[in-house]
Amino acid sequence: MTKLKEIEVTMGAAKMDDSSNTSALRNPGDDDRPVLFEAADVSKNFEATRALDHVTVQFQRHDVHAIVGENGAGKSTLVKVISGVYGSNTHEGELRLEGRKLSIHNIAEAEANGIFLVPQDLQVVAELSVAENIFLNREPHRLGVVDWKKMLADAKKLMDDFRIDCSPTDAMGHLSTAKQKLVIITRAMARGVRVLALDEPTAALTETETQILFDYVLELKNRGISIIYISHRLDEITNIADRITVLRDGRVVDHLERGDPIAVTQRVVRAMVGRNVKLQSRKGYERGKAKLEVQDLSLEPLNRGGRPQLSSITLSVHSGEIVGVFGSVGSGTDALVGSLLGMTNVRPTGTISVDGKTVSLRSPSDAIKAGVGYLPADRGRDAIFPVLSVAQHITLLMLSIVSTGGVLRPRGEAALAKSYIDQFSIKISSSDDLIGQLSGGNQQKVVIARLLASDPKIFIFHDPTQGVDIATKKEVYDVIDELAKAGKAVMVVSSDLEEIFLTADRIVVLRAGALMGHYRSAETTEEEVLSVATADTLRDIGHN
């Protein structure tokens, strides 16, 4: 493993040229398995925006079919058409199941035909049990009342069948995200799923949880289910997909099947982006004064007898540098972020200083006043208001600048928003567009624009490129790099080790609430950092 990581993919035409290694690839016509489901010549508009443009895709039994493309390419729109989120009266073209034309007006009608969607933002009832979620609105009844004994027994059989390690009586909200997704898929199985669409299924999952999900998907495939798999993670696509359809600007630009991972990745990226993209780690930086200092920060356990959430964490972030914070689920990274934002259930001990002055961070407003800016890991839950416009989001923290005497100046709001819309090439028809109607990547750009508009002293980016395509990822990394070059102090907290090495000058590793070590990214390797993050015992590692 090199100590300085550089990833470069060159994109040109939608197809690889004659000099490319295409011998490892197969074309869709090479497989004569019967078509189970088809989206035929589907088009859809959102006012003046053409989201899908005569898209035709066929899905087969015993098949994992990936849909890939940049943010805004039309992937989510297509899967929402297929799953009934957008009814037949809202789009052109046809949906066919075993050659039979379907007229699907809503999600219930899609599910009645065996077509189910597991969205990126899970829709579960956290307060109900696992069994109740599996049989929601389809509970078995006896003598006019819910037959709890049968429901629990049926749920346990399904969970045993798919080796889901929890009890049917467990509260859904107490399960990990990975287990919640498995339960939702099990619910689809209980209802006779034939076509299962998974939208960014591994977002927020650990590597172990991802492998469990893959095993589950392959089991469904072996049972004859047609899997539609949407993801920005091309390594996952080449690992699990039997065939791939690439969308760009609402059109199908390529179809291909499983082959050599490198050749497949090159062809997919060429098709989806159509231009040069280069991800490169930072090379040298000028480290200034300490802007953020954390000394002996500790956070007590949530439950009596549990281990501390944080144990004597000491670290600093200087102007002009990017510090990466890496750790797996439960390592303490979330607790550290919560402490820096004043968002912990118990008060931390130790000191937090900004510009050499100790600050008391009891709430997010205290953090904002202290000059701490934050990009949340879960934008859908923590960063956006779907019913507000793009302009309203960008100026949300800057209302004093676009207001006079407490009255909002619409022209001022629009002008400030436009400057960031242009800077980040956010794809919208108007700054009045609702953010909930944008693709995930464009939503992320809006949230970053809002953060930059507030101009904090210290930036904390939490999983900043989760669920975005490679081109948007480069734009985000460029923004982070430019902030550091401008003298800002930047912290990148990520569960993606490659992301840490691409962005950070120094790396801090947490495990079980303890700081395991400090490293300079140019002087260590991914293997070394990962081994420390997953070590069984604490080690005495020197600070650089």
Image (tube, helix red, strand yellow):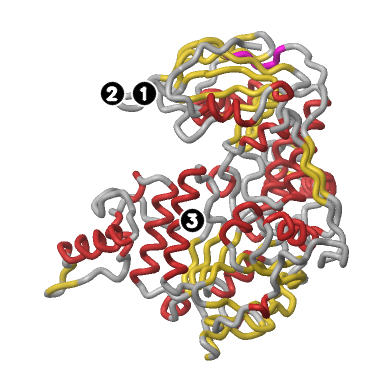
Q: Is residue 411 visible?
A: no
User: Is residue 505 at least partly visible in the picture?
Assistant: yes
Q: Amino acid at mark 2?
A: Arg
Judge the density around disc 1: few (<14), some (14-19), many (≥20) Cα neighbours within 10 Å: some
Camera-nearest label, 2 or 3: 3
- Estimate the x, y position of residue 11 in percent, counting from the top left: 84, 56
* Residue designated by label 1: 301
Mark 3 crowdedness (10 Å alpha carbons): few <14, some 14-19, many ≥20: some
Q: Which residue is rendered at x = 16% and y = 69% of the image?
A: 145
Kind of residue at badge 1? Pro
Task: Kindly identify the amino acid type of the residue bearing the numbered disc 3.
Answer: Phe
Residue for badge 3: 214
Tag 1's secondary structure? loop
Give how far apart the Cα atoms at labels 3 and 1 are.
33 Å
Earlier in the chain: of badge 2 and badge 3, it is 3
Which secondary structure, mark 3? helix
Seen at 30% across and 55% down, the residue is 130
Q: Find out whether residue 282 is within the magenta segment.
A: no
Residue at the limit of the structure toward the front, as seen here: 23
Task: Between residue 336 and residue 209, name the one nearer to us.
Answer: 209
Instruction: Give the Cα separation between the discs numbered 1 and 2.
Output: 7 Å
In front: label 3 or label 1: 3
Can residue 293 be found in the magenta stretch? yes
| Residue located beneath label 2 in the image | 304
Where 89 sits versus 243, above or below?
Answer: below
Give, as a single range, the part of the protein colored magenta.
290-294
Q: Position of residue 62 (x, y in %)?
A: 49, 73
Task: Please say if the residues under marks 1 and 2 sit with CB atoms less than 8 Å apart.
Answer: yes
